[in-house]
Image: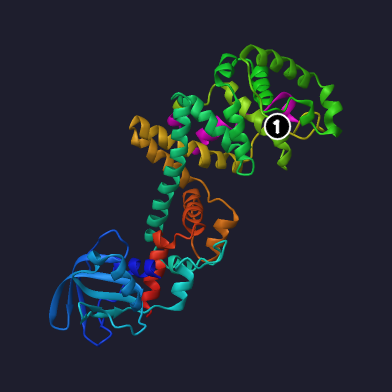
Amino acid sequence: MEKLIYYIWKNRLFPLTGLRTTSGEKIHVIDHGHENGNGTVFNDAKIKIGEQIWAGNVVLHGKSSDWEREISCDRKCTENTILHVTMENDCSMLRKHGEEIQQLCLGYPESLKSEICGVVTKRGDNLPCAIAVSQLEEVKLHCMLSRLLVERIEEKAKKIQDIYEKCDKKWDEVLFKTMIRSFGFGIQSELFEEMANTIDFNALGKHRDNDMQVEAIFFGQAGLLDEASIPYYYRNFALKSNYFNELKREFSFLENKFKLKKMDCKVWEAGSSSPHLRIARLAAIYHCRKFSLSAISSCNTIEDLYALIDIPLHGYWYNHLCFGGTETCGNGRMKQKQVDVIIINAIAPILYVYGKHRREYSLCGKAEELLHSLKSEENSIVRRWRERGVRTACAGDSQALLHLNKSYCSNKKCLECQFAYIYIRSVLKCL
């Protein structure tokens, strides 16, 4: 409750007229003061009470009886107090040096306390602020979402910067490690990230012209050339396959040559989706040599990026989903939604970081433009906001809402959120 009243006073969300002390004196807040850092006091405030103008400190509490605790904890902060602001008036007499201190009781609705003051459902499904936000003008809503989007990109940028430092500042390696993680599509992102950290890019680069050896390193270091990784009902078919056996021979040679380390194949058993086709696509992208940061930076349209990422598969992976599996019809091209996810989670963030690193801020702008040119993502979080009237016009908006849910709603940081500010202001205006 103290955090809530502190928030209201800090953002001047109290009524500007009609304020009275608990004893009936009129109050006019000339200057609400500035924070002193202890969370309950504003210094150098200027308040007109009745016909008298006072200058000094304003002390804020949930209840008037909390004043005694404040005095015992920090006497310096309570010196020169001219007004005590509370949410509840429990009829305690506020005194300093025997004199009564004027008290302003703002009052509050029960809904404000329960919905905003951290007492929300565990999953954050309540979203009391959504109705107020949905009534905003399009321009204001767009500004709020744009700010959240920048926070989202900056958060991803920090992770990419960490990869950059660990990769001895090799941008192409950073690019592919970021790309590899994005191919996990959320469900297996951690496993694909582990695979990216396992792959020896020095060894990989020396054999980039040989597609079989590139595939051997990708599948081998992922642990997927171990016979134990193949389901028993496909195993005999895989062991009789010329392609599989050729990969095994190539990886055995390269493993000994470069002292490669591989993942434990058992980690892939936890996932319900087979990673083979996605790993084959990554190998194809790496082998074609078209995909690089300079190539991404040169792209002027989404279609140009699609052409860089969606490299068609040929040979074994054109009609197989895993080693030894039954043949399927055409796996040549990726689905557009998959490419969009890769652009959202890998291309746009790394383009943003790369632009900041080179001080080419046009690339940062291009990264944001990419997100605004893609369709809004479809997931449970975005749908929940949309059902409550918050509109999403593009992937930039949906990314903003994902960041809002992750960084604010799930952590119950309502009083640090601009959406909550809109809601609290709308509620207080109704009082």
Side (left or right) of 212 relative to 130: right
User: In the rendered view, would you say 252 is above or below 99?
Assistant: above
Q: Which residue, as the protein is rendered here, is positioned at the far bottom?
A: 24
Image quarter where the C terminus lies is bottom left
User: In the rendered view, would you say 282 is above or below 52?
Assistant: above
According to the picture, the residue beneath numbered tag 1 turns out to be 276
Q: Nearer the viewer, residue 165 or 41?
A: 41
Task: From the top left corner, tell me how far across and down residue 316 is, in percent.
Answer: 74, 25
Task: From the top left corner, tell me how far across and down residue 199 is, in percent.
Answer: 60, 24
Q: The residue under label 1 is which amino acid type?
A: His
Q: Is residue 13 visible?
A: no
Q: Quadrant of residue 263?
A: top right
Is residue 216 a member of the stretch shown in magenta? no
Q: How is the image coloured?
A: rainbow
Q: Quadrant of residue 41?
A: bottom left
SS class of the residue under badge 1?
helix
Image quarter where the N terminus lies is bottom left
Q: What are the residue bounds of the magenta stretch? A: 296-320
Could you tell me which residue is drawn at 31 percent across and 66 percent down?
Answer: 73
Around disc 1, counting alpha carbons within 10 Å, would you say few (fewer than 14), some (14 to 19), or many (20 or more)?
Answer: some
Side (left or right) of 422 relative to 182: left
Could you tell me which residue is drawn at 76 percent across and 20 percent down?
Answer: 243
Could you tell me which residue is drawn at 70 percent across and 32 percent down?
Answer: 276
Task: From the top left corner, tell me how far across and down residue 211 is, in percent.
Answer: 65, 18
